Each structure stands twice: as structure tokens, then as C-alpha cells.
Image: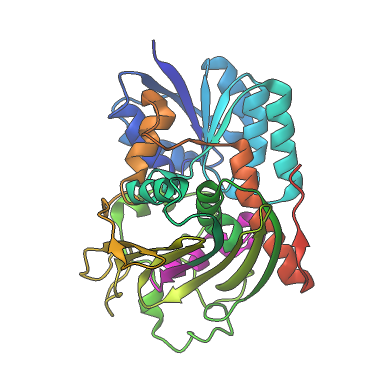
Amino acid sequence: MHTRYAIVGTGSRAEMFTRALTGPHRDTCALVALADPEPHRLAVHNARLPAPVPTYPATEFRRMLHEEKVDVAIVTTVDRVHDEYIVAALESGCDVLTEKPMTVDAQRCARILDAVRRTGRRVRVTFNYRYNPLHETFKRLIASGEIGEVGSVHFEWLLDVRHGADYFRRWHRDKANSGGLLVHKSGHHFDLVNWWLDDEPAEVYAQGRLFFYGEAGAGAGAPRDRFALGSDPHRDELYTGTSDGYQRDQDVFAPGVTIEDDLAVLVRYARGATMTYHLTAYAPWEGYRVMFNGSKGRLELEVVESDHVAAGATGLIKGDEPGRATLRVHPHWSEPREIPIPYEREGHGGGDARMLADLLGAGPPSGVAAAEAEDGARALRIGLAANESIALGLPVRIRND
């Protein structure tokens, strides 16, 4: 018997799910409907399916769930409306898979958690970084006591000028839509640290600014074509000829950017560990460094996804570097050693395929648990508290309710 899925929000991200449901997981899953405010995107997605499915305006989402007897709703809309569809699906008797972030503010988050409690249904958030095999290895080392009790964490994430610019050309550039990068992007990273530490964030202090992008950005002197999206016929088909007037490739130095591109966060956890976190959205290379300091030593992970962006590269083109990752343990009183780790370049380090296998019914990989609604809320609370701290210039205590 097939589990029946419907998707609301048919932008480019939805295609990861349409391919999985009609490809590798078609023996146990059935895609039965699509919903979106834009008829053109519905038509494009439907034309790409092995067989077309019924389509509905987003305003008729509840009717779709009822008529198509949907078991699980997949939410891949603009972030600010996630809660509308999540709550509607829960109240209609469906479980939910939602793109991260679960939502963009505290009120919407509380509304989702209340609906989960009232209905007894399940919400899972697509935090695919949990499923990256090297992050699983990192988790296992910490849980084993390899470096003892964790005292502090330092986490630096670099988005290169190709990838980073993408958040400043699309709908994400308006904080009302996305919550800013601390909610939309860093939520992935906050979830990882929450999961690695198995602890609750308690207090946040943050600083941030729009430095490189925007109409007064320090990068505005560079040639504009280096920040253009470039042509991709497969992607462009979704966004050309729509009736909503949405522009997928806005000027990253034009007015209207209300999110930050340089962000520093300090988090204190309930058991006393601290995390210093920095996100740079205009770096020359892409990747991240994570360091855990413990009572028995130090654990260091470095991942280089791309070591440069070529001068003529646009769209999804990166430099020639194939990517690499290094994990080292530095014990007290002995020499450091390197830990062999799996590294896959495609699909978020192999996390996408493993996540989809779990969420669509094949079960989780060893040591990985799907992110539930409360996990989504825990990551969101850090980003929201950080945004509030930037606005106030003060530390913000987190309420975990």
C-alpha cells in the first residue's frame, strides 16, 4: 500500500521531492497532487512528472488534502507561509514534511507546536545536514566521550560570492519572507550543534550587519555580471512566463535588501557549554570549520566545498576544486590523529538521499534521528533570539515553550 503525498509550493526546491517520490521511492510512495498560487509553475512541474497529477490553487489546499486522500503534506513554499499549510495539514489529519526553517517567527512557531499537540500528528523538518555521514561520525565521537565533557564550540560557515549572492537576489532578501540568514540558513547549523550537544540553548547575544550586498554594499564596485544568476533552461522554465511578476534574479546591490550578510552569534547552553558562531555570505571560498573543546581534548572538522569562484562563473558553476574534508582529534597529552571520514560532494554530502530514504519510509541511518517539530523550534529559537539581540543590542534569554 502506497503512502499518499501532496506538495504545496512548486518552486525549484519541490523538485527534490517530486523526483524522489516518482523515482527511487515509487514502490512505497505516491505523489497524488500539487498546489501553488502560480498556475505556470504547477504546469511546468506536472509536465516533468512521469504521469500528471491533479493540481490545485494554494487557496484550495484543504480541499486538495480531502479530495486526494493525502497522508503526508510536503511544504516547500516561501518560509513566511509555512505555518499556514503545516497547521491546515495537521488539522486535516495529515502528517507533514516541511522545508527548513519550520517558520519565521515565535508566534507562528507556537501555532505549529500547539497544532501538533492538539492533533497528535507529526511534523518533520528537512534538516539534511544531520544525514551527512561525516556529521554522523562527528556526533558519534562526541557521544563516545572522545574529548570528554564539551566546554565550548566554535562554528564558522562561509558562503562564497556565488552561493551567498543567491540569497540577496531572491525572495530571501526580504527578512519578512525568510527571517534573515540566521533563520533561513543558519537554522541548519544551529540544529547540528543542538543535536551534537544534545542540549537546550538558553541565552543568545548577536551582532550583524549588511556589509557587502545592498545599495551601499562594500562589494558594489565589482562587475555586476559576476553576481548574476546566469542561464539554466531547466530552472528558468519555472520562473519565466509567470503571472505573479516574481523576479528570480534581482540585482544584489539594488535597494530592498533587509537581511544581513555578516553575522556573529554567542550562544550559552543549559548545561553550560558556549558556542561562538559566524556566518559570512561573501567569502572567496565555500565551506565550514567546526571546533569542539572538551575536558579531554579538541575535535576539529574542516570542509572545503569550493576553494574559489572563477571570475566568469555564474549560476551553479563553482571552481575546479572537487571538495575535501578533514576531521582531527587533538587529545590532551598525546599527538593529534586524523579520523577517516566519508566525503561526498553531491547532495549536501550525501545527506539529501539518506534524508529522503528516512522521511519517505525506508528508515533512518544508524545514529541519525529525523528532526521533529520541537527540533525545528529549538533551532529557530536561536535564530530568532539572535535577530532580537541584534535589534536590541542586548543578550536575549530563550524560552523553550
Judge from the rendering whether residue 328 lies leftward or rightward of residue 154; answer left or right: left
Judge from the rendering whether residue 397 lies leftward or rightward of residue 376; answer left or right: right
Residue 68 x, y percent position in the rendering: 51, 17
> Which residue occupies 43% across, 68% down?
159
Q: Is residue 33 visible?
A: yes
> Looking at the rendering, which quadrant does residue 331 occupy?
bottom left
> Which residue occupies 47% across, 41% down?
10
> Looking at the rendering, which quadrant does residue 29 occupy?
top left
Is residue 203 highlighted in magenta?
A: no
Quarter containing the N terminus? top left
| 253 up-or-down from 204: above or below | below
Q: How is the image coloured?
A: rainbow
Judge from the rendering whether residue 364 lies leftward or rightward of residue 218; answer left or right: left
Residue 166 x, y percent position in the rendering: 45, 65
Residue 190 x, y percent position in the rendering: 56, 55
Judge from the rendering whether residue 327 lies leftward or rightward of residue 125; answer left or right: left
- Farthest residue toward the front? 333
Which residues are the magenta region?
A: 156-180
| 396 up-or-down from 370: above or below | below
Quarter containing the C terminus? top right
Q: How many marks?
A: 0
